[in-house]
Amino acid sequence: MKTWLVVVLVGMAAVLTAGVAVMGLLTVADKDGDRHGVALVLDKSELYKNQRTLTYTIVNNSPDVISFGAPYDIQIKKNGEWVQVEWMKDLVWIMILYTLEPGKSFSQTIELPKDIEPGHYRLVKEITVEKTGGKMVLTAEFEVIGS
C-alpha cells in the first residue's frame, strides 16, 4: 500500500489566467516519487457581508481520476483554530459521486447565509484518488468583510 504525503499550501498561491485566485493547493507524493496535483480554486478571496454566493472549482492536474461527493464544510478561524460554523452542522447532502478526469475541472456555486458574520473562513472539501482509494483534504480560505 502506498503511503501518501499531503502538503497543503494555504494562502494565495497563484493567479490563473482567467483571473481566478487560487486559495489552496494540494500536492501529493507517494513513496515511489509519483506526483499528483489537485487545486481548489475560489472565485473570490473577499466577500462583503451582503454577498452570499461563492463558487469553488476543483482542478485535476494529476494523472489520476479523482472523485468526490456533494458535501463540503465551512470553518471559521477563532482564537487561532479552525472550527466548523454552526449553520453547517445541520445540513443534509444528496448522495452523488462526481468523477473528474485528469486535466478537467468541476465548479459549484454555494450560498452563504444572509447573516454571516465577518471573519476569516475556509472551505474544506475531501476528494479520493480512484486508483488507490487515497483520501485528500482540500482547503481554500476567504474573508468576509463587514458591510
Image: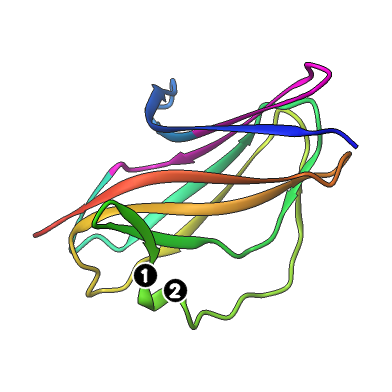
Residue 108, quarter of picture: bottom right
Q: Write the start and end of the magenta stretch as one range.
A: 25-45
Residue placed at 58% from the left, 81% from the top?
92
Asked if marks 2 and 1 touch (Cβ < 8 Å), the reply is yes
Q: Which residue is mark 1?
A: 85
Up/down of 131 relative to 112, above or below? above
How far, Cα to Cα, is label 2 from label 1?
Answer: 6 Å
Residue placed at 33% from the left, 55% from the top?
81
Q: Which mark is residue 88?
A: 2
Up/down of 3 relative to 125, above or below? above
Tag 2: amino acid? Met
Tag 1: amino acid? Val
- Badge 2 crowding class, 10 Å Cα cut-off, few under 14, some 14 to 19, many 20 or more, is few
In the rendered image, residue 139, in percent from the top left (x then y), is placed at 49, 45
Up/down of 115 relative to 47, above or below? below
> Which corner quadrant holds the C terminus?
bottom left
Q: Is residue 37 magenta?
A: yes
Q: Main secondary structure of the magenta part?
A: strand
- Badge 1 crowding class, 10 Å Cα cut-off, few under 14, some 14 to 19, many 20 or more, is some
Residue closest to the eye, 62 or 89:
89
In the rendered image, residue 103, in percent from the top left (x then y), is placed at 71, 28
